[in-house]
Amino acid sequence: MNRVAAIDCGTNSIRLLVADVDPHAGTVSELDRRMTIVRLGQGVDRTGRLAPEALERTFAACREYAAVIEELGAERVRFVATSASRDAENRDDFVRGVVDILGVEPEVVTGDREAAFSFTGATMELPGDQERLVVDIGGGSTEMVLGRREVEAARSVDIGCVRLTERHIRHDPPTRAEITAVRADIEAALDLVERTVPLTGVTTLVGLAGSVTTVAGIALGLPAYDSAAIHHARISSGRVAEIAGMLVDSTHEERAAIPVMHEGRVDVIIAGALILLAIMERTGAAEVVVSEHDILDGIAIEAADEAYRAR
């Protein structure tokens, strides 16, 4: 066992997992898992730069995480940064701040690398070796990975709940024209995915990240967010369509009143739900298997393997 800390910094949130990991058995014994909405990607699609206030929110979360990591005594820290920091002109400011606080340099990964981490984390507990399509809907990008126990095909596309919200949604509730524009971007991105990843005939669809888990919590009618109840829940395509339709027609206040809704997702969940729905429609999947294990777990397994080999 190796005690490691994995940090995933995306467009909308930054998350920490501290765990005892056996990289050979693929087991992750969680000690602390937490998430903070920092909206690092605020305005990046429009300006090409990370906003000063977004950087400060992210650094504040890093300081909190550094204290947890020290308290739990992780022997190795792995920090992976995804879509927003890939796209930003001033990502060096982000890198310097993380190094100052945590003492490690963030690895700004490609979409394909992000996809591989997500696949490892999402599938490590699933039985059998049937083909699965793993879908990780982030704030700035969505990764789609096809495989059994190993990645067979993967593609990352620049559609995410934050990016599409900032690009198209101006009204509350959004207008039909705005929803049409969001759907058009999603469909165009899925056309790109299909050049690399076959989407038709998918029998097992595995969905990751906050948009998917929030839709699952709504579908299950949970009185509060419950990770254990959501993990490996199966939500039908019809139920996803109902929830997406409800969200599209709702106001900010109505979405905020949903018990499982994190306050940082209220304004971006519409786009996230529409991405999930479009993927289910394109693939023909009857249901989505929801996983609370994702890129963080994949990062932790690789960090533990590095620690083991370094001994």
Image (cartoon, rainbow, N blue to C red):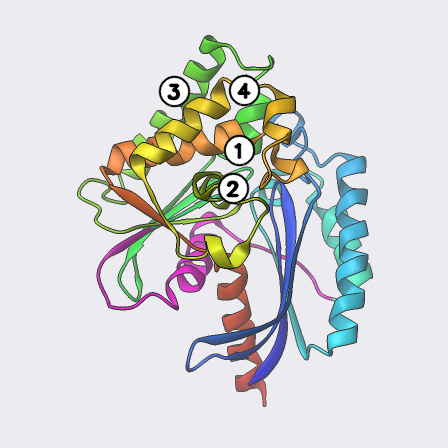
Identify the element where label 1 is drawn.
Answer: helix
Residue 292 at x, y percent in the picture: 49, 56
What's the amino acid at mark 2?
Thr
Q: Residue at x 81, y 58 (%)?
A: 63
Q: CA distance from mark 2 to mark 4?
A: 15 Å
- Mark 3: give few (<14), some (14-19) or many (20+) Cα within 10 Å: few
Residue type at mark 4 is Ser
Where in the figure is residue 200, as x and y percent of width and height? Answer: 19, 40
Q: In this figure, which residue is indicated by the disc labeled 3?
A: 184
- Mark 2 or mark 4: name the one nearer the start of the chain: 2
Residue indicated by mark 4: 250
Which residue is outermost to the bottom? 311
Among numbered discs 1 and 4, the one appearing first in the sequence:
1
Specify which label sits upstream in the sequence, 1 or 3. 1
Q: State how far apart marks 1 and 3 are (Cα).
A: 14 Å
Disc 3 versus disc 2: nearer the observer:
2
Residue 161, label in figure = 1
Task: Tell me the SS state at disc 4.
Answer: loop
267 shown above or below 25? above
Q: Earlier in the sequence, mark 3 or mark 2?
A: 3
Front one among 279 and 97: 279
Q: Is residue 42 magenta?
A: no
Q: Quadrant of residue 281?
A: top left
| Label 4: how many Cα within 10 Å (few below 14, some 14–19, many 20+) | some
Q: Which residues are magenta?
A: 104-133
